Image (tube, rainbow, N blue to C red):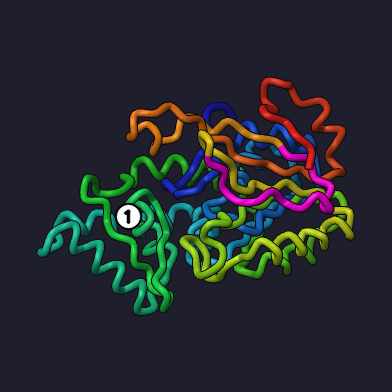
Amino acid sequence: MNGKTPHIVQYQGSKRLLAPQILQYMPRKFNRFFEPFSGMAAITIATAKENRANEYFVNDLNKPVVSILQMAIDSPAALIESYTKVWTEQFSYQKGHLEHFYYIRGRFNDGEQTAVNMLYLLARCVKGSVRYSRNGNFNQSPDKRRHGTNPKKITDNVYAISSLLKGRAFFSALDYRDIFEMAQPGDLVYMDPPYQGVSNTRDSRYFAGLGYEEFSQSIEILNRKNVDYIISYDGECGNKEYGKDLPESLNCTKFQLNAGTSTQATLLGKKDITFESLYVSANISEVIESIPKQITLLECVV
């Protein structure tokens, strides 16, 4: 399949634009691909586009987000039909399109946490950013400047993703450590955990915090099992660093990926470049050595 990697909807924190760089750090072929903090599974989709694995395991604690992917892959026509119906209703809703968003959000929070309602909320909310209150309710606001992703735009991408992954994808909403236990030598685990800055409490994308020590210690499970892994974990912009490096004891190699000019910096009249950190497990060292040097910016070993 040629062209850009398909995606269903905008999702804050997605690694879709960084996928070409991230894939250069992966082996060309492996047995199974696991994405324990999948979000909208941008790296799973990019990996499948290059047919690098035999099976793909999509996991995220946010079950409604996983259900979008499952329905898109297994039942694309049903997802598109249902989404079109909900999206179109906003234009005839008596109280206006913004109140229609709050109506769907209320239904979602009252228990109708379906794939279609989650997709509509993501497509319609500010920056495609999932936000939950302390009591677990979705509380993000609608983007007042637009009406959300048009179903016609979603259709081609949904069918493209389905063609890549149908019959080869498995879905779950488990703790990431349960996914670690499933992985075996010959598999690859890609992780994009919550940013350290939001990991001490309930955070913006997941239902539970993820502390630095807890996560670092859990990676040892993969090291003991001799399972290859790649981790996207914070970074830096200008003179500001976000989060601590992962421990030296993990024996990873750290790279900095050029994520482009910071939007926030641009608003302030600056041209700071954002670099996102990528940690690669020791077993992939032969692949690392073959990566073109122009891609491996600011290389350092931790």
Out of 71 and 190, give the one closest to the viewer: 190
Task: Give the x, y percent position of residue 111.
Answer: 39, 78
State whether residue 55 appears in this view: no
Residue 268, x across and y down, in percent: 34, 34
Residue closest to the eye, 290 or 194? 194
Q: Quadrant of the image for the C terminus?
A: top right
- First to last magenta residue range: 240-254
Examine the structure image and report whether residue 247 is included in the region drawn in magenta: yes
Drawn side of residue 38 relative to residue 177, left or right: left
Q: Tag 1: residue type?
A: Cys
The secondary element bearing badge 1 is classed as: loop
In this rendered view, identify the residue nearer to me: 263 or 189: 263
Looking at the rendering, in which quadrant would you find the N terminus? top right
Q: Residues within 10 Å of mark 1 (few under 14, many from 20)?
A: many
Image quadrant in which you'd find residue 258: top right
The quarter of the picture where residue 78 lies is bottom left
